[in-house]
Image: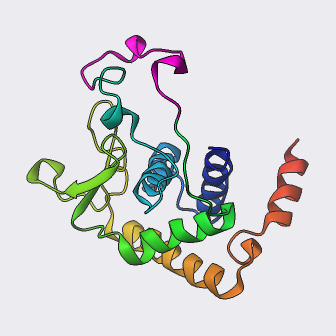
Amino acid sequence: DARVKPLILVVKKWARHHKINDASKGTLSSYTLVLMVLHYLQILNEPVLPSLQRDHPDCFDPLMEIDSVPESSSYVPSYSSRNESSLGELFLGFLRYYSTQFRWSELVISVREATTFLKSKSWGNKFICVEEPFDGKNVARAVYEKAKFKAIKAQFAESYRNLFAKMDLNSVLPVRAIIEHESQKR
């Protein structure tokens, strides 16, 4: 789906701008953010993305070595989403989901299964749990300080409120300033 890549890029820019995208500083890694976006796109009433591992276990066996995964998409039937949401609607929905609907203290995000499941003792007392789809480990384990976790949740909530109220991406991500800053780096 052509909306996936731009949505991931916007989410990563947004998170970096708000300083919640740096695992070395106890916030979310880029990989964690990508999995969070993919999960959101899988759980919509009209999903944008399927779960390849759940829907095609013959091609994506969890015990399979990564090098054994077929490179050709001919092994997987094509998927066409009936979701007609715009990129802006998907970004707003992403912020809404993680600020008002997702139960951080209880759930683990699973892209592998296109769902969530309850945290068990094996997940420990981590604030954010996002399952790595191939080895099952928590890719959000860098978020181990309560203050960082609260800051991440607060940023999702504040951005959702601002974007919902103004319906302008610049209210949560000053696009022009970012473009200028990046062009100066070149």
Q: Answer with left or right where residue 181 lies relative to residue 4.
A: right
**Predominant SS of the magenta segment:** loop
Residue at the spot 71% in from the left edge and 85% down from the top edge: 166
Measuring from the top left, give residue 64's x and y in whole percent.
29, 17
* Residue 32 inside the magenta-drawn segment: no
Q: Residue furthest top?
A: 68
Q: Can see residue 22? A: yes
Q: Answer with left or right where residue 3 lies relative to residue 132.
A: right
* Residue 75 inside the magenta-drawn segment: yes
Residue at the spot 51% in from the left edge and 47% down from the top edge: 34
Q: Tag count in the figure?
A: 0
Q: Nearer the viewer, residue 16 or 64?
A: 64
Measuring from the top left, give residue 50's x and y in whole percent.
43, 43
Q: Quadrant of residue 11?
A: bottom right
As drawn, 106 above or below 158: above
As drawn, 184 above or below 53: below
Q: Answer with left or right where residue 133 lies relative to residue 151.
A: left
Residue at the spot 41% in from the left edge and 16% down from the top edge: 69
Stretch in magenta: 62-78
Q: Nearer the viewer, residue 129 or 71?
A: 71
Measuring from the top left, give residue 29's x and y in whole percent.
48, 48
Residue at the spot 12% in from the left edge and 47% down from the top edge: 122
Q: Nearer the viewer, residue 79 or 64?
A: 79
